[in-house]
Amino acid sequence: MELGDLIKREGLYTSFDEQTGSFVIDEEKVKKRVANLSGDGTVIEWIDLSFVDTEPDAAVVLRTNPLLLKKRLEERGYPAKKVRENVMAELLGVVHSNMVERWREKTFDVDTSTLQPSDSIQLVISAFEGHAKRKAVDWLSELRPDELDELIGQIDFSSASL
C-alpha cells in the first residue's frame, strides 16, 4: 500500500506546504490507520514510518545516490526546497538512522541507484524472508569530495531544515 495515496484519500494530513508541494501528515491519525492495517500481510510504502507504534516484519529503506535523486526530483518538477530537503536527508541517511533507531535488527538498506525495479523488489522480498545482508549505505564515504561539495554547496544554511 502506498501510504501517501491513503493519506490524501482519507484526509490524514493537517495542511499542505506550498513551498515543498507536500501534505503535512497528521502523525496520530496515520499511526492509528497503520495499526489497523497490521497483521494482515500488508506491505506499506512510505518515506519514514519510524513514528508508528506497529512493529514491522522488516523495515527496508530504499536508497538512491543523492546526485541521481537530485536529478530525478528536478526532472519531475519538484520545488527547489523539496529537492534540497530530500537530497540532504538521503545524503545524511536520515530515514535509515530513524529506522535503525526504532528497529535495528529489522532494518535493511537497498541501494536502488543502478537497479531495475524488479531487482529492487527481489531485494525487498529477500529482506522480508530473512535472506538479505545488512549493509548500511553511507553516501558521505562513497561520494567523491567534488560531488559532496556540489550537494552541500546548494544548502542555504540560514534557512535549512531537515
Image (spheres, grey):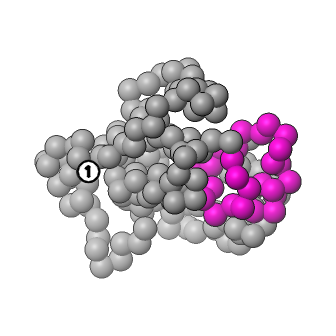
Which residue range is magenta in the image?
31-56
Taking depth in this image into account, of 51 and 5 the one nearest to the observer is 51
Q: Which residue lies furthest to the bottom in this view?
A: 158
Q: Could you tell me which secondary element the residue under label 1 belongs to? A: helix
- The residue that appears at 37% across and 42% down in the rendered structure is 137
The answer to whether one can see residue 127 in this image is: yes
Taking depth in this image into account, of 36 and 84 the one nearest to the observer is 36
Q: Mark 1 points at which residue?
A: 140
Q: Position of residue 120 (x, y in %)?
A: 52, 27
Q: In which quarter of the image is residue 162?
A: bottom left
Q: Is residue 42 above or below residue 131?
A: below
- The residue that appears at 46% across and 31% down in the rendered structure is 133
Q: In which quarter of the image is residue 18?
A: bottom right
Relative side of 33 to 145, left or right: right
Taking depth in this image into account, of 8 and 126 the one nearest to the observer is 126
* Label 1 crowd bin: few (<14), some (14–19), many (20+), radius 10 Å: few
Q: Is residue 12 above or below residue 112?
A: below
- The residue that appears at 50% across and 67% down in the rendered structure is 19
Instruction: Identify residue type, mark 1.
Output: Leu
Q: How many labels does the image show?
A: 1
Taking depth in this image into account, of 97 and 89 the one nearest to the observer is 97
Q: Is residue 37 magenta?
A: yes
Q: Does the magenta stretch include residue 108?
A: no
Q: Is residue 162 above or below residue 141?
A: below
Q: Position of residue 123 (x, y in %)?
A: 53, 27
- The residue that appears at 35% across and 56% down in the rendered structure is 92
